[in-house]
Amino acid sequence: MAITIALANQKGGVGKTTSTVEIAAVLTKLEKKVLTIDFDQQCNLTKNAEADRNLPTIFEVFKEEGVDLNKAIQKVPAGYDLIAGSPSMSRADKEFEDVQDAYLLADLIEAVGPDYDYILIDTAPARNKLLNMSYLAADYFIMCVDSGEDSIDGIDAITTDMMKFHKPGKRQLSESKIMGVIVTRFRDTNIGKAVIEIINDKIDNEIPSDIKTENKPFIMTVREAAAVDESKMMHKPVQQYKKSSTPAIDYRNIVDEIISRTEQED
Ligand SMILES: Nc1ncnc2c1ncn2[C@@H]1O[C@H](COP(=O)(O)OP(=O)(O)O)[C@@H](O)[C@H]1O
Ligand SMILES: [Mg+2]
């Protein structure tokens, strides 16, 4: 059964999509079977990965009866599988009102899980029903933050929301845990170091043990480099565009860490 990881932060522009693409590319290179799900109405993952946008999207899979899930799954040029995002997901809070709808993503993952080693969810920058679905579907959360205060506050928001789904006796019970934090666009400056300290303190003192892995969640950095934006222009993971660049190296280290943590628990 696949290990499902959601990349999250309700703030936009903090590296969720970049991290999804890079982690997927490295895992694929290591011959892991990977499915990515574009859960953001902006569809950046779908566009970036050059996915075919004529296939059924995640919205149709959730909303329309009789959509063949296998037809919604496509292999993208970078070599991993993807379910495309949809602008209609902006209406998620209205469209997925039933109590049972909270399990749409969990059910999908249960159906395709046996076919994959890893499933990555590129979440939207919003605290909405879609994020709630992710709490019920993902084994792990990896938070992405840049050095901005809002993005660090995003850790608190996820902590609060996740705890709501971890209450004993709660009908919708989540088992997902925070596995780590990726500090993206990292610069080794005083600010960079301070950010790591703040996150470390949050992990030790503010994130309840119910929602973090027993093995202390990691804090790993991805250095800032122009290669990331260049690779986007080329519609390629930086792993393929410039393997020797610092972000490419950093994402390989992150994947090593993810593998060692997840395969250890198996
Ligand atoms: N390590 C990095 N170095 C330089 N630019 C980066 C790095 N990581 C992400 N970016 C850039 O930051 C912007 C936001 O990243 P993105 O992954 O789209 O964030 P999100 O999905 O959280 O909105 C993009 O333009 C991306 O190319
Ligand atoms: Mg994104």
Image (cartoon, rainbow, N blue to C red):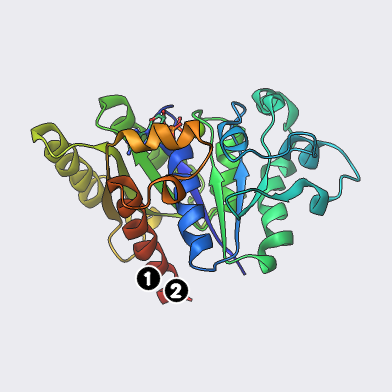
Report x, y in % for residue 228.
38, 37
Looking at the image, can residue 173 be seen?
A: no
Q: Which mark is residue 64?
A: none
Q: Is residue 123 above or below residue 204?
A: above
Determine the image quadrant of residue 55: top right
Q: Which residue is mark 2?
A: 263
78 with respect to 71 (left or right): left
Mark 2 residue's CB less than 8 Å from ligand 1: no
Q: Amino acid at mark 2?
A: Glu
Disc 1 + disc 2, Cβ < 8 Å: yes
Can you give x and y, in whole percent of width and height, for residue 88 in the image? 71, 25
- In the rendered image, which residue does mark 1 sit on? 260
Q: Residues within 10 Å of mark 1 (few under 14, many from 20)?
A: few
Tell me which image quadrant ligand 1 sits in: top left
Q: Quick check: is the Cβ at mark 1 less than 8 Å away from ligand 1? A: no
View extreme (left): residue: 190
Residue at point 44%, 37% (across, down): 231
Percent position (x, y) of residue 184?
31, 39
Residue at point 49%, 29% (across, down): 125
Q: Which of the two residues, 210 or 228, is positioned nearer the viewer here?
A: 228
- Disc 2, SS: helix
What residue appears at the point 57 percent right and 66 percent down from the top-left corner? 117
Which residue sits at x=49%, y=46%? 20
- The answer to whether residue 166 is visible is yes
* 76 left or right, relative to 26: right
Left or right, 114 with respect to 66, comes to left
Where is residue 33 drawn, in percent x and y?
60, 64
Side of 218 where 74 appears, left or right:
right
Give the Cα separation between the discs numbered 1 and 2.
6 Å
- Amino acid type assigned to the residue bearing label 1 in the image: Ser
